[in-house]
Amino acid sequence: MSEETVRLYRSLKRIRRVEEVTAEIYPSDKIKSPVHLAIGQEQVSVAVCDVLGPRDWVGGSYRSHAMHLAKGGSLPGLIAEMYGKETGCCRGKGGSMHVIDVAAGVMGSSAVVGTQIPMATGYALAAKMAGDGSVVAVFFGDGATEEGCFYESLNFAALHRLPILYVCENNGYAIHEPLSKRRARPEGICGAAEALGVPATRIDDGCVFAIRSAAETAVRTMRTGGGPALIEAVVYRWRQHVGPNEDYDQGYRGHDEAQPWKERDQVARLAGMLDPATREAVDAGIEAEIEAAVAFAESSPVPAAEELYADVFA
Amino acid sequence: MSSPESRTLRYVDALREAFEQEMERDSTVFLFGLDVDDHLGIQGSTKGLLERFGPERVFTTPLSEDAMTGVAIGAAMAGRRPVHVHIRMDFMLLCMNQLVNIAAKAHYMWGGQVRVPLVVRSMVGKSWGQGAQHSQGLHALFAHIPGLKVVAPSNAHDAKGCMIAAIRDDNPVIFMEHRLLYNTEADVPVAPCEVPFGKARLCTRGDDITIVGVSNMVQEAIRAAELLAEAGVRAEVVDPISIVPLDIATIVRSARRTRRLLVVDNGWTMCGVSAEIAARVAEETEGVRIRRMGFAPTTCPTSPWLEADFYPNPATIAETAWAMARPDAPAWRPDPERARLAWQVQFKGPF
Ligand SMILES: Cc1ncc(C[n+]2csc(CCOP(=O)(O)OP(=O)(O)O)c2C)c(N)n1
Ligand SMILES: [Mg+2]
């Protein structure tokens, strides 16, 4: 039971529980925000953020709760944001799809598919210009790799040797559409990156340690001018594309497809690697933290009417 | 008022019927875009079409809106009649280059030798935390460009009639739908029917004020007119149905008579459709008092408490209209509870 295992477990379990609690609250209609849960695919954010420092940036999509929490983004701020409260991480203006924590290096997530990819590449350009050795990691789905800006960004990053790790969380679906209906070569994402000059690694079993190790190698190289890299982490989304529930009864996928992924669940796997006393202490800490964050969101004030017009311009 | 020739249909089902009838009639019509063939079928508006017409005419695409728009334009020039679907109007911003630089201009710039019979459908979102990037009504951006037609049907009847007219039109048509209208019902003809573009409809009659609504704001304005009627103000609600071409004559005629014009848009007022209508009426009339309402001049927030103030609603429309029609009377506002629209209150997310 290494220190690293405890740390990764804590991060994985914390994200899992935050999202489970979000799903439990959801039917109360207190969260009037479209939630895209990462349950089942938390390990990608956890592994990558584990090798990043406080001065490194991360960027992501509408499905960014995991990234936000793994990078150290505020938990009360996240829950309060979903509640639409003044204390939310966007002051109630962004909701679940638009999270940010500037102090923690969470750059602000965007809900138009792919838009975070060039934006993060810009952060990487700025990091290179600053020459401070900081790096950027940007998370996106398999669907986002079909947008033109993905290719254009990778080409530019390779050309300028930008310190950016492109992290494709390939869960096999864009909403309900499988990769096979969107790509002639579903396994071609890494090849496309390589063709543009971005070294790519595919990890197809969802192993948190394997993803961490690939990220560590890539980040070490880019801190000293080694240029961009891409990791394609194959994962599985357990819940609906958007919303709190499972959707195996909808006909577009079945439990059989999910089963191997549930057996490989990284939260359960790492839980089994911890001694029971340690695990219980970690779990208790997580529950207390979540309870406090929910209470904070519930008791926070709603935004004042003037807030509607605040921050249109800087 | 149902008859054998028509029956009550929901907005989404009316759209679906339009696709079914047009695809049946004309084998060059095809429908594509993200998720058109999944089990939900764009909230039901494309449901069953894959089974009926097959995957060559009903298919999803990669997440590549820019290129897919170009593909649609090319296919249209080559003789097909594509209907390209976006689940939010916001995503059409990825298509701007293709739509503005190619689709809108092709017929003119190439001397009238090619046509782009393309329909681009998109849905405008509202409420349940749609927020900055899932709620925009961008019809004014398109209306600005010569060569693009822009329609925004406000009810199930017009949804069917406008869609059929759009598919038959030899020009690119930007078709704006509103997510919260999808469950609203109207009497819809069974047979294929066209609602012609450039012909506004008078939804209510009145002599005190003209209220022009756009898209779902037509429904909000009709509710406002009902509340105003109870207070003794008779409002004439006009639905332009199409923004390009715009039936300004009907609006001018009504405004000349009522001497008051309130334009309520499902978009921002700055350089928006409401500005255009107000300017045209001001140019063509004298002594008409004009006001505009639309999105608050800010980005749409997700917090429900802030979002409530972002949109005009039947209460604020009625209050504004009252102040225009009864400038010397004390201010009046309807009971906000009675101003709420059931189909909006009942709407639940996540999307
Ligand atoms: C440009 C754009 N097109 C379409 C959408 C609608 N949409 C939201 S999520 C999504 C699927 C994205 O799939 P993927 O990138 O694989 O990410 P995942 O949701 O699986 O994490 C789509 C099509 C959007 N938000 N933005
Ligand atoms: Mg995906």
Image: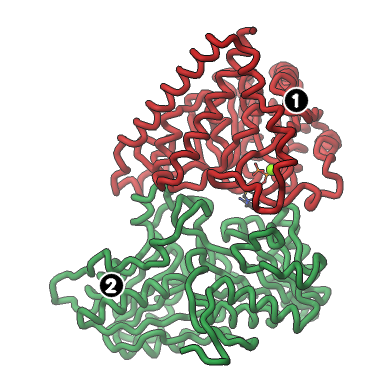
Near-viewer residue (A16 or B270): A16
Subunit under mark 2: B
Q: Which residue is drawn at 77% across and 47% down?
A: A179
| Residue A35 seen in this snapshot | yes
* Res B112 → quadrant: bottom right
- Circle 2 residue: B318
Residue A91 drawn above or below residue B157: above
Subunit under mark 1: A
Depth check, mark 1 against mark 2: the one in front is 2
Q: Is residue A155 left or right of residue B299?
A: right
Q: In this view, does A26 lie to the left or right of A245?
A: left
The three-letter code of the residue at mark 2 reads: Ala
Near-viewer residue (B124 or B257): B124
- Circle 1 residue: A227
**CB of residue at label 2: within 8 Å of ligand 1?**
no
Q: Residue at x 75, y 49 (%)?
A: A178
State the separation of the CA atoms marked 1 and 2. 60 Å
Q: Colour of chain A?
A: red
Q: Residues within 10 Å of mark 1 (few under 14, many from 20)?
A: many
Q: What element carries label 1?
A: loop
Q: Colour of chain B?
A: green
Whether labels 1 and 2 share one chain: no
The three-letter code of the residue at mark 1 reads: Gly
Residue B63 drawn above or below residue A101: below
